[in-house]
Amino acid sequence: MHPARKQKLMIVLFILLGSMVTVGLILVAFNEGLNVFFTPTEVAEGKVEAGQNFRIGGMVKMGSVVKEGLEGTDIEFIATDTNKDVSVRYTGVLPDLFREGQGVVADGYLDENGVFQATQILAKHDENYMSAEVKSALDAGERKQAEAAMAAGQTP
Amino acid sequence: MNLSGSRQTLGTGASLAATLQRELLIILRSPGDIVNPLMFYVIAVSLFPLGGQADAEWLSGIAAGVIWVTALLAVMLSMESLFRSDYEDGSLEQLLLSPQPLYFHLLVKVLGHWLLTGLPLVLLTPVLAMMLALPGEAYWPLLLGLLLGTPTLNLIGAIGMALTVGLKRSGVLLAVLVLPLSIPVLVFGSGMVQTTLNGLPYTGLAAVLGALLVMTVSLAPLAIGAALRISVN
Amino acid sequence: MNLSGSRQTLGTGASLAATLQRELLIILRSPGDIVNPLMFYVIAVSLFPLGGQADAEWLSGIAAGVIWVTALLAVMLSMESLFRSDYEDGSLEQLLLSPQPLYFHLLVKVLGHWLLTGLPLVLLTPVLAMMLALPGEAYWPLLLGLLLGTPTLNLIGAIGMALTVGLKRSGVLLAVLVLPLSIPVLVFGSGMVQTTLNGLPYTGLAAVLGALLVMTVSLAPLAIGAALRISVN
Amino acid sequence: MWQWLYRLGSPKLFYDMTTGFLPWLTIVTYFLLIVGLVWGLGFVPPDYQMGDNFRIAYIHIPMSVGAMGIYAMMACMAAMHMIWNIKLADLVARSCAALGATYCALSLVTGSLWGKPTWGTYWIWDARLTSMLILLFVFIAIMALRSAYDSENSGSKAASVLTLVGVVNLPIIHYSVVWWNTLHQGDSILGVSSQSANPPEVWSPAFFVGLGLIGFFFQALIRRTRNEILLHERRSQWVQQLLTSKQLQE
Amino acid sequence: MLSASGLYCERDERVLFSRLDFDISAGRVLQIQGSNGSGKTTLLRILCGLNADYEGELRWEGKLINATVEHFRAGMFYLGHSPGINKALTPMQNLRWFCANRGFADDAAIIAALEEFGLSVYRDIPCFQMSAGQQRRVSLARLPLSGASLWILDEPFTALDRRAVADLEARIAEHASSGGAVILTTHHPLQLSCALEIINLDERGPQ
Amino acid sequence: MLSASGLYCERDERVLFSRLDFDISAGRVLQIQGSNGSGKTTLLRILCGLNADYEGELRWEGKLINATVEHFRAGMFYLGHSPGINKALTPMQNLRWFCANRGFADDAAIIAALEEFGLSVYRDIPCFQMSAGQQRRVSLARLPLSGASLWILDEPFTALDRRAVADLEARIAEHASSGGAVILTTHHPLQLSCALEIINLDERGPQ
Ligand code: HEM
Ligand SMILES: Nc1ncnc2c1ncn2[C@@H]1O[C@H](COP(=O)(O)OP(=O)(O)OP(=O)(O)O)[C@@H](O)[C@H]1O
Ligand SMILES: Nc1ncnc2c1ncn2[C@@H]1O[C@H](COP(=O)(O)OP(=O)(O)OP(=O)(O)O)[C@@H](O)[C@H]1O
Ligand SMILES: [Mg+2]
Ligand SMILES: [Mg+2]
């Protein structure tokens, strides 16, 4: 082959090989998981040890929030991913959007009792925006559905 | 022409080896280029115990971050010597006009630079990690991360250096160009240490670092070459 | 000689004002010299949360140290433009041969440099402090410390720059010379923040920083002058 | 083969074509912006959780998407400049940089202002936020590099190379929310294409503002590019003619 | 070998040359003349491919140069204002790298070339210890090594003493007579034993 | 004004000059001659106090120079190889700073000086936009402004065109005739309307 062509071909092959290896390694990485926070399930599986700082993410379980202390700044609630639960304790002011049934992300560590001691609480907002009326209408609809389901003897 | 009988045709590989050898010889002749970045690394890392608290727990908390960030800065400062003398004495023009493939020559040049500045930096790291009370289990991911990460940083730095070698004052500008692009390496590299400290496997992150390395190895020479052509203009 | 009637004799003060004005004019003409160190400051500070952990508690623990160390590095990199162009175009020789007192001229030059690079850096700090989640009560000691500390760092950096201005590549060498000398400023400066976070008064440390400033203001010009005389030789 | 491209790349042609077009674009832009903002900020019902805060979306989202779009456009221009040596492409890229940096900075500012009431913090080192910050750094680095060169030609080429290198950041920004569990929410809320339950009265103002900001970008881009063209071609015949005819009019 | 047609170049809004055509074939020596700043260096850098800011057409052995870059580079040798010699290395090391770049290793030839340029004794001395003229000779020693047919030389006589100048002139004439070609600039009156063509740039660009 | 006795200087282990004595008084012009690298610049820098690596004695108006530095600096003006002009500033700004350094402010005089050197139109243009010769003129415009009696000029004719050279020669002669003194180096044959003394360094140092 013409030497100049050969050079070009070598470079092209090298880059192609590089891209393939890159893609391969990225796939490996995704298999291993890159998440920056852990779900309650992962916590329950024992992926983290007590005392380590990490970030947990989940939903605030309906009806689980308990406020204590003088100004209600000692807070305890349960973070859930519907599969497993982790109880979280936090002292401080909560962000406005902290609601039951909403996403939450917390920094902190597990104590010996398996309670997550949070140092910071952040509210994660979901992707849906709606006006209050729409929401209540929707909620009403859901409640009706739920009642209907109850009436039919099924567990919601 | 006097092509005597001793003439030996070289393939691309041998010609690359010659470039590597030249690179190493040149750096070895000016030890300041090797020693100064290392000195910077040591001094800058030791600033942190002084600037913050000095208790072991606090230190081990910041160790990985500090080591990675300082290594990044040191690598960047060490880039200053790459291409600079070649630019000034005209060797760069010769390289650009050489009939050999520029792509591989540039790769080899950066490799030579890494061998004499990046590698010593990695080898020095355990000492600094000890000074910062890094827990024992984090040494391996730290070193592996730096081994995979510093060549990437060198390649990114080489792009920046190639872009600024024609300018008179390039120090800060180089940093401004190169640091943002190096952030991913930093994030995954120090992430490896952090995950280990959290008791998790670091293979995923190491794979990402490897992917970044392979990607820059295959693409950076193109950018470096284009940038050098602009700089000699 | 054509000494027309409009001639006005200037005292030392007015002649210093002229030097200051020139310094400011020159820096304003090359905005890169102002903007690049600031960019470096911002980028380098953001490297730490990325390289370390990102939670607010960890960040606020290292905030003071990180800000101080990075400010130190940024000041040092910004020094590159001081004396460099004066050296290259021969203005430095003119300054050294001027019948006016060199001591004050150098002081004013560094002051000009600080006004356009050090001061913006201090002013930018609150934003970075916020990004690093520094507790509110620590803002004042941090800013006060930087206000007292950056001029000192500039003066120390000016000594280093004066020593290396005659060399071609000064970047890393400058860092290696200057960083060790700047450690006291760093220790007391970040100490101010730490004491405040521990609920103690910081006046004592501020006084030390003030003392360091006054000392360098009075002694550094001598060292800078001597170093410059060596460099132009 | 690329003849048409070169012809399109003629600064004079660009200048002539935009002369008539620019006023219309400007009018439409302001109309869209005013309608969208008044509607979005004043009339759309508040969100059931975030209340009025969510209105920041009408600025934040177009700014964010805009900044990324501008970068993508700048990268295309840089590629055209590098490959076919089209000067106009570089003039456009140059105008893009400053505008993109502005959009990017506004995205960061509006995002943080929104973050305080919703997440509880102005800033957090989350993948999307960080990568957006890097985008701002890259924009600034490109401008700094260009201005560091004395020779304009080399400066443009160097800026083009850096622009192309920086493109890797774009997919990182976009997919950051997919690859990592970030605090910043995922794709698709106000998007028209989205499957989500957002009713039209929520997303239509966004549509207006979005189009308006795109329009704003283009009219600002065209204005800046026209200035650059005049500056660059100031010695050419047609610019001289233009200037004398302007002077005659006055 | 190399032919140019309709070359045009402007720099900083000043036209350096326009409508420049020439054709250089084996056995010819072409001198580019012009006052300081007239664009000689710029022209040579355009010819050898270091500068791409020009309009017009360049052909190497009939083909457009961009279509045959590798060929062209192997057949051409450029020596610019700066010598392309690393000062920390010895002449031997410098020239070895040069040869490797050209795809061969041949210490005997390097030694012969150094001898030809009067540098035998300095073979293993780092270049920074040598005077300007000696450094220049190291870079000239690449001429016989390059194996190129077209030499492009920008002021090759700088810093050379009288004898060395005469030697180099002889070398250039020899190269031309053995089928090579040379394009060069110089401010000094050339004395060649072969025909010399001249292009004067001062007449080319509107001042 | 300035007298030197027994000056000796070596650089890089090579003696540049030794046992150099001279005495320059009002109305005299002294030219230092010598080949490249013979030490002319070094000598001038020693005289004006920028270089302290020498042996011997320098006196200003009878007093040892170190004892009367401020006086000496006020009465002397040195112009070296590099122009001492900041390229980002305009001629006016550059010269204002120069005057302030010399302890006065006088815009009228600056304007007159710029006019004398043919720079009136360029008064407010940043120097980097000017050609080498024009930049040189800006630095020369300091001569009339300096108010110094002794001028020390290192190759002041560099980059000047023929008319400017003649003007500067006239200026130098005028300065000497009005009671000043000048020490200068140049490679060009000086044509002065006044007496010229010459020191040749090539005869001073052992080669
Ligand atoms: C400084 C902080 C923030 C930055 C840098 C930022 C950045 C961005 C970017 C770059 C995008 C465009 C993504 C793409 O098109 O791929 C985006 C979209 C968006 N941002 Fe933010 N953001 C910030 C804060 C917030 C906050 C606090 C909220 C609300 C809770 C928010 C809500 C959104 C929404 C709803 C979108 C549209 C998502 C989509 O449909 O793709 N952002 N932001
Ligand atoms: N790096 C540069 N950037 C912009 N313009 C330049 C640059 N280098 C040279 N020029 C301009 O290009 C013109 C031609 O320069 P060139 O170096 O080709 O001249 P030359 O004929 O080689 O002169 P000399 O005889 O001094 O070597 C000059 O007028 C100069 O002003
Ligand atoms: N910075 C330096 N360090 C060491 N030696 C130097 C330095 N500058 C010059 N020299 C040496 O000092 C000697 C005298 O140099 P000088 O500049 O005084 O010569 P010159 O007579 O002014 O020459 P020219 O005519 O080229 O201006 C030279 O031989 C040179 O090698
Ligand atoms: Mg030339
Ligand atoms: Mg001299």
Image (tube, coloured by chain):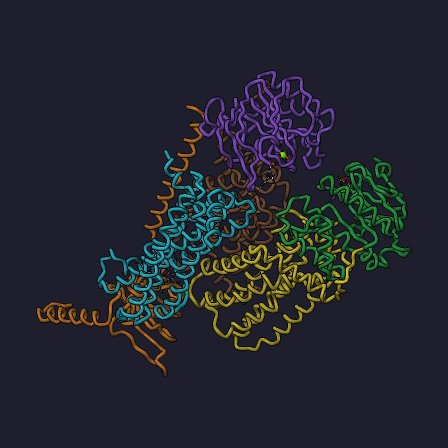
Chain colours: A orange, B brown, C yellow, D cyan, E purple, F green
Residue B36 is left or right of residue F142, and the answer is: left
Q: Quadrant of the C terminus of chain E?
A: top right
Farthest left residue in view: A152
Q: How far from the left and from the top, in percent, is residue A113?
A: 34, 70
Q: Is residue E14 above or below residue C61?
A: above
Q: Residue at x 54, y 37 (%)?
A: E10
Splitting the image into 4 quarters, where does residue C73 fall? bottom right
Q: How far from the left and from the top, in percent, is residue C164?
A: 67, 52
Q: Residue at x 64, y 74 (%)?
A: C207
Q: Residue at x 47, y 53 (%)?
A: B180
Residue B216 is left or right of residue E46, and the answer is: left
Q: How far from the left and from the top, in percent, is residue B214?
A: 42, 43
Q: How far from the left and from the top, in percent, is residue F5?
A: 90, 48
Closest to the observer, B94 or B132: B94
Q: Residue at x 44, y 68 (%)?
A: C57
Residue B41: in sight, yes or no?
Answer: yes
Q: Is residue D233 above or below residue C141?
A: above
Q: Is residue A151 above or below residue A43?
A: below
Ligand 3 sits in which quadrant? top right
